Image: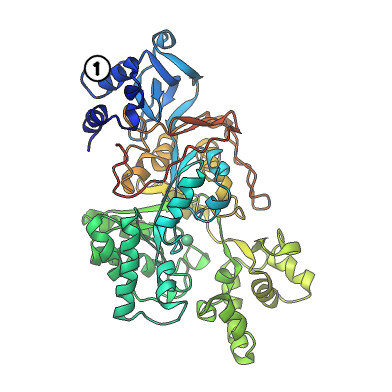
Amino acid sequence: MDRRDFLKKSLVLGGTAGIAIATGDAEAKEALAGAAGVRRPRCPRKADILIKAGELYDGVNPLPVTSDIAIVADRIVYVGKANPKIESRCKAAKVIDATGYVVCPGFIDPHCHLESLLLKEKTNEPYLRMGVTTVIAGMCGGSQYPLSDYYGKLESQGIGTNTASFTGHNTIRSKVMGQEDRFATKEEIARMQELMRKDLDEGSFGLSSGLYYVPGCFSEQNEVVELCKTIAPVGGIYTTHVRNENKYGIGLYNSIVEALEIGKSAGVQVNISHIKCLGKGVWYQSDKIIDTIEKYQKEGMKVTADQYPYLASGLALASAVTPAWSRDGGLAGLKKRVKDPDTLAKIKAEMVDLIDERGGAETIMITARANEYNGKTLAQAASMLGMDAVDAALKLVCDYNAYSNTFVMNEKDVVNYMTRPWVMSCSDGTFGAHPRAAGTYAELIQKYVVEKGVLPLSAFIRRSTGLVAETYHIKDRGVIREGAFADVTVFRPSEVRANATYTAAKLLSEGFKNVIVNGQVAVEDDKYLGTLSGKVIRRGVDTTI
Ligand SMILES: [Zn+2]
């Protein structure tokens, strides 16, 4: 349904945009009629919020226009060139003077791991404080299942940001066959397909895989193809943490090709999650990978990627430095295996290489779940323990299930991916052990837009808003226009600060004047106002009525 149809329909049905109409507010009715194209859009005489004279980047067009925006209830009802008389023409309960500020759609984070965290920390303040109004969770193979239960909980407790989710391959595989190191049978694949369909009915955006992690790493390509065939008929998307982002296993390049071939065989759109070149063994392969992805795009396949702007990756230390086969059966499986001296020797021999590939014990940083070792490098932890790096790593894994940051990327590849028009900004954020969860969008603005100047502001906004909405078919968000949801971010690029660091990952970002979620001001001058105006976004549901 296009904007005009929606507005016509909402006028008839009195939908969410028509709240003012239902209460007989003639001004809002007039504004919406104008927005529907009945005549040239004109500002309403009354609005809930007026944002005046901001440099508007609408999420689609690269050039800003100095504009006024009026919001009624949860919708944008008016967008027009800035007019000095706007305040006398449009009486608003709240006026935001955005003179000298950038005004753009609220950022949409296409890849995060906040699903369980949002049940505990419903405000999602770290994201709001860096301009994010929508987060998409259930990534890298792990999701809350079933989504019906999860969405019900979110809706009853309220959330600060809008939220959507994918269905995790590892999650549904575990439900059918545990964490076993073997291929799935036909019957097991059929059972997984059933679980996938159930979630699709609840609004899942598609399938996410984590083919590097247990148990996804035990599956063959065909299993994923068969699962993708269930998402194809409804336009679901396949997003994947590819099998190997480093030189190990089938290697980075072949893993990217595997993802593309899965999409091609099943006829689905593919997104490469947190695209990167992980470890010296694959540095500088970004050119070759970009060429290959663009070749598939030219052949007609829809392929995108998302990316976080840091040189360190963050993950469980077990996943970083122990071989996948040793984790068959999860951490419990690993703990059993290290008791057998021969197996232990094999695990340790492989760990030497894996630690080296992650940059060595001096650069692997223990960040969470490991008490006094948090904030220490693996080398420091090893000397505290009086052990060598391999033994220390194994202890930190088995006794603490420690979380780590490992410095595995180089900036040339990071910038190379960042400047492709099909790569979206993402946080890949989780519980705050890596600065990306509280800093990503501020880091992009401060470091890559303002300081280094490698990413034009318009490109940053596009890859953080409209491109994400279009990629994931999210209607009426990621764009500023009449009829769209009023998710809006107001900031001045030179004032934005990413405060989160590797040792203080939870420090919130600064420099955002206003962040508005569904027409409610959530952040004002770096203060969170306690709103819970986020909504659950379901795939395929026409959220416009
Ligand atoms: Zn991942």
**In this rendering, is residue 183 above or below 196?**
below
**In this rendering, is residue 373 above or below 458?**
below
Quadrant housing the C terminus? top left
Kindly tell me whether residue 416 is visible in this rendering.
Answer: no
Kindly tell me whether residue 538 is visible in this rendering.
Answer: yes
Question: Which residue is located at x 58 percent, y 46 percent?
Answer: 438
Residue type for callout 1: Arg
Q: Of 152 and 492, which appears nearest the observer?
A: 152
Spot occupied by residue 271 in the image (x, y as percentages of width and height): 35, 56
Image quadrant of residue 483?
top left
Disc 1: CA contacts within 10 A as few (<14), some (14-19) or many (>=20): few
Image check: 187 left or right of 366? Answer: left
Label 1: state its secondary structure.
loop
Image quadrant of residue 149?
bottom left
Spot occupied by residue 242 in the image (x, y as percentages of width and height): 41, 65
Image quadrant of residue 458?
top left
Question: Which residue is located at x 45 percent, y 80 percent?
Answer: 180
